Amino acid sequence: GKRTSHDGRVYFVEPGSQLHDLVKKWKESDITVSQAALDLNRIVSDVEYIDHKPSEGMLMIKTHKTGSSTVASVLRSLAAMHNLRHPVLFHGNKLHGTRTWDPRRRLDEMLNFTSTDGSRGAPYDVWAVHSKYDSVLFDDFLPSTGRILSIIRDPGTAMRSACAFFSNCGCPADRGNASVWNEFVLSHEGRDFFTKKVKRSGCQLNRMTLQIVGGVGNSVKYSNHTGKVQDWIEESYKRRHVLLVTERMVESMLVLWHEYNLHPLDVVFSSFKVSSKSEQKDEESIEAENVIREMSPSDSQMYRHANLRLHNPPGT
């Protein structure tokens, strides 16, 4: 558990630690950048830091266009720094980490990935690759944990980002032009596209919850599975699943630190894609986002749950 002071408070950076002293010097301008870099290097090279491992295995279900790559980079980094086993995905000589791995179809291959420490095969300590949720991930991949970690984004903004990223999803609108996108979403053509046409899974309505709770494949035109999501939410209170929120990334990282007893340096992140600032939107954009939310009841339900859990983390 976290160390506390005599007054019972839990500190993100423990008073009296090397990191606390470094932060204090930096805040008071008593140290140069080069000196701070040397001090920081000494801290991460120290056996006390290297041996500070997560309290349990970390099983992440990645979701597309939610900032999950930022979270995954944090997990891969801590796996490397603390000598933990995390799969390194290569296909031939090319890094191949963007496909969604399905345990039901490629279990043998997934169980025999090479890890960051050079070993081969499961079990792993950290799992942060795109894969569909399946209970076999606990049994065979990370038996050291009984819960998952994932991240979700406001479905109203996530859809446009996904359609722009998956350029071959079939969407006829110009996703780079807000006005054109909004007009399409608010039209009958747009509603038919989202609710009736087969498209890439990354551009499906309710796609985030399909990835998190497990669901059907790409052949489904439209899926509303709020009942299954509610079952997952009820189970999450018992199993203490950790669900982060894209728009609240700093808070999410603090929850990650707290839930897995991580070192403060393990949750430092930098991303040009993740922003907590809200931009001014016109009425048409707000209306279009609301339409997507209404057509995405499962994702909207899960997003509300995730925000609620950030107010009351699983360990509280």
Image (cartoon, helix red, strand yellow):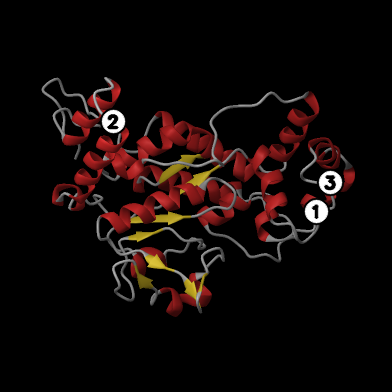
Compared to 268, does 147 lie above or below? below
Identify the residue shown where x is 77% and y is 45%. 175
Question: Sequence-wise, which precedes: disc 2 or disc 1?
Answer: 2
Q: How much space separates mark 2 and mark 1, taking CA atoms?
A: 51 Å
Q: Position of residue 182 (x, y in %)?
A: 81, 37
User: On the image, which quarter does residue 211 sit in?
Assistant: bottom right
Q: Nearer the viewer, mark 3 or mark 2?
A: 2
Q: Residue tagged by mark 1?
A: 171
Q: Amino acid at mark 2?
A: Thr
The residue closer to the viewer here, 77 or 110, is 77
Question: Sequence-wise, which precedes: disc 3 or disc 1?
Answer: 1
Mark 1: secondary structure: loop
The residue closer to the viewer here, 165 or 307, is 165
Q: Residue tagged by mark 3?
A: 190
Mark 3: secondary structure: helix
For residue 269, side relative to residue 158 (left or right): left
